[in-house]
Every structure is written in structure tokens, then in C-alpha cells.
Amino acid sequence: MRPRRRYPNFVAFIATGTILGMIAGALISTLSGNPARNFTENAAMGYMAVTFGVIGAILGGLAGVLAEMFFTRRDNR
């Protein structure tokens, strides 16, 4: 009997990347020390969190694709 092929859960990879990116954006905004002239501190933190969240989602999706390539290559051996 052939073993079942396993696929990575892309939603989990993307969601994890988004959450980590949002945390990183909020931390960078908070710890940067440069006050935003045109925005409140909370608005600047929100913009940074969303921007880094999108970047994190892209990187998380890329990590999922790389994981799938690794598992596919391993299964073909």
C-alpha cells in the first residue's frame, strides 16, 4: 500500500506569517522613537502593522510553497 501524500496547510502558513508580520510592525512602530507628524501614534502603528502583515503573509505563502516542494521531492525518492 502506497503512503498517502501529505500537503502543507497553506492557510496556516499565511496566517502565521500575517500575525508575525503584524507583531513585528507594531513593535517597530512603537520602538522606533520617531513621532509621526501627520498621524497619531496609533494610526502609525496600524499602518505599520498592516504593511508588515501583508509582507508576512507573502513570506508565509512562500514558505508553504517551499515546504510543499520539499515534501514532494522527498516523496518522489
Image (cartoon, grey):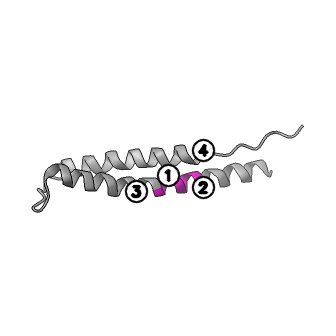
Residue in the image at 37% along x and 50% along y: 21
Q: What's the CA distance linking mark 1 and mark 2?
A: 9 Å
Whether 47 is among the magenta residues is: no
Quadrant where the N terminus sits is top right
Give the magenta range: 58-66
**Amino acid of disc 2:** Val
Name the secondary structure under disc 4: loop
Q: Earlier in the sequence, mark 1 or mark 2?
A: 1
Q: Residue under circle 2?
A: 65
Q: CA distance from mark 2 to mark 4?
A: 10 Å
- Which amino acid type corresponds to the residue marked 1 in the rendered image? Gly
User: Mark 4 highlights which residue?
Assistant: 9
Question: How crowded is the residue under tag 3: few (<14 C-alpha within 10 Å), some, or many (20+)?
Answer: some
Residue, far bottom: 38
Count neighbours of disc 4 (C-alpha within 10 A) and say few if under 14, some if 14 to 19, many if 20 or more.
few
The amino acid sitting under disc 4 is Asn
Mark 2 Cα-neighbour bin, 10 Å: few <14, some 14–19, many ≥20: some
Q: Is residue 5 left or right of residue 23?
A: right
**Label for residue 60?**
1
Residue at the spot x=33%, y=54% of the render?
50
Looking at marks 2 and 4 on the same chain, the residue that comes earlier in the sequence is marked by 4
Residue 54: mark in rendering: 3
